[in-house]
Amino acid sequence: MAHPKRKISKTRRDKRRTHYKAELPTLAKCSTTGTIHLFHRAYFVDGALYYKGKLVVEAKVKA
């Protein structure tokens, strides 16, 4: 197994890691409800669950 001959400095290590950045998630607008949501995720609107603009689970109405 390979072993480093010298200690890598913090500056050199951090230069290598500059490419790993947090990115903002891609958002989508629902054509049915008009809400903003994450891609490939189900989302709630007024208690009802939607996915890809289609109603998946209806909201229960309490009397």
Image: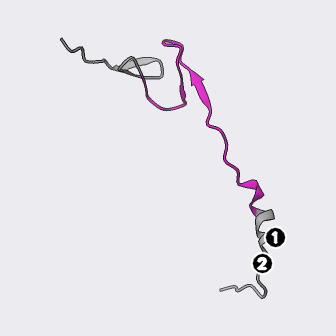
x, y percent for residue 62: 21, 15
Image: 25 above or below 32: below
Residue at image coords 76%, 83%: 7
Disc 1: which residue: 12
In magenta, the rendered stretch is 17-44
Residue at image coords 36%, 19%: 48
Disc 2: which residue: 8
Q: Tag on residue 61? A: none
| Circles 1 and 2: CB atoms closer than 8 Å | yes
At label 2, the amino acid type is: Ile
SS assignment at label 2? loop
30 in magenta: yes
SS assignment at label 1? helix
Return the residue found at the far left. Answer: 63
61 in magenta: no
Quick check: 44 left or right of 11? Answer: left
Residue at image coords 70%, 50%: 21
